[in-house]
Image (cartoon, rainbow, N blue to C red):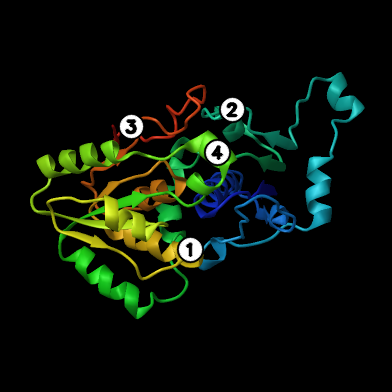
Amino acid sequence: MIIIKLIGGLGNQMFQYSLGRCLSEKLNCDLKLDINSYSNQCGLTPRNYELGVFKIKECFADVEEINHLKNKKRSFFQKLFGIKKIYYFSENSFSFDNEVLNLTENAYLEGYWQSEKYFKRIEKILKTEFVLKNEMPKSNKEFLEQIKCTNSVSLHVRRGDYISDPIINEVHGVCGLGYYRKAVNYIAEKVDNPHFFVFSDDKEWVKNNLLTKFPTIFVNCNHNDSGHLDMMLISNCKHHICANSSFSWWGAWLGKNDNKIVIAPQKWFNNCNRETKDLIPNSWIKL
């Protein structure tokens, strides 16, 4: 059995699930989700379990199963003969750690695991599971039709808690208008007649500040509690401009266009000490 601890918002949960799903597929064992972190929260940005909207393999770990793996110790004989069975595996850094993919036993995993290298081998499986259980609302379908019939480019602006929460702001910061201008210009050089579809948790700000000379549609049919619908709309766009956000990362990664152009910010964190070379797929453009 693999138990993966879920923390953070939708994008983070998708990274965590994807690693657990990859290991469960490799080891031919059950995957269970630990969602206890959502019971006791503090801070300005409370989160909820959000993966239930997708057609994933959803099974929750109980307290007994969690404690069994988190607290399990190596026996005297395992230590004597040098048998290194790992039952609790915690992410040590932001860089890809191949060791976790070499697990051969039941394990409890805790971390963010933000690299496609953890689950690239099951890409096709994930793209069949990260689809909506329920039909899109009519308001979303109207935008979807426009997305499908144009050279659509998703443009995601993350503000919200990146602005309002001082701790989160110190870690992440926000992508400036200069980044978005460069990204729009890059797309315009590569794509004929691009149509930009803007997604943001600060709709008024983007309307007042994000101006282009190209057709631009501000997607306003969803609220913060239905972000998964925005993500699905993003995934249907032909090309993508990401914010420094796991949310737009997943929207772009799930993109259905085999020839998609994906632009991501070179600076993902305010703290330059965090190594992000494994976060952005090699085929994406960093600006």
Q: Distance between the residues labelled 4 and 3?
A: 17 Å
Residue at the spot 40% in from the left edge and 46% down from the top edge:
249
Q: Which of marks 1 and 2 is nearer the N terminus?
A: 2
User: For the residue carrying disc 2, how many other residues have a C-alpha within 10 Å: few (<14), some (14-19), or many (20+)?
Assistant: few
Pointer 1 residue: 224
Residue at the spot 48% in from the left edge and 42% down from the top edge:
119
Task: Tell me where residue 28 appears, x and y as whole percent.
Answer: 61, 49
Q: Distance between the residues labelled 4 and 2?
A: 9 Å
Task: Tell me where residue 150 appears, x and y as whole percent.
Answer: 15, 61
Q: Which mark is residue 93?
A: 2
Q: Nearer the viewer, residue 211 or 247?
A: 211
Type of the residue with mark 1? Asn
Pointer 4 residue: 113
Look at the picture and state if 259 lies above or below 203. above
Look at the picture and state if 141 lies above or below 39. below
Pointer 3 residue: 282
Q: Earlier in the sequence, mark 4 or mark 2?
A: 2
Task: Tell me where residue 128 appears, x and y as whole percent.
Answer: 42, 60
- Pointer 2 with pointer 3, Cβ within 8 A: no
Q: Which of the 4 image quarters holds residue 149?
A: bottom left
Q: Is mark 2 on a helix, strand or loop?
A: loop
Q: Which of 121 and 265 is in front in this view?
A: 265
> In the visual, does 143 lie left or right of 275?
left
Q: Which of the 4 image quarters holds residue 73?
A: top right
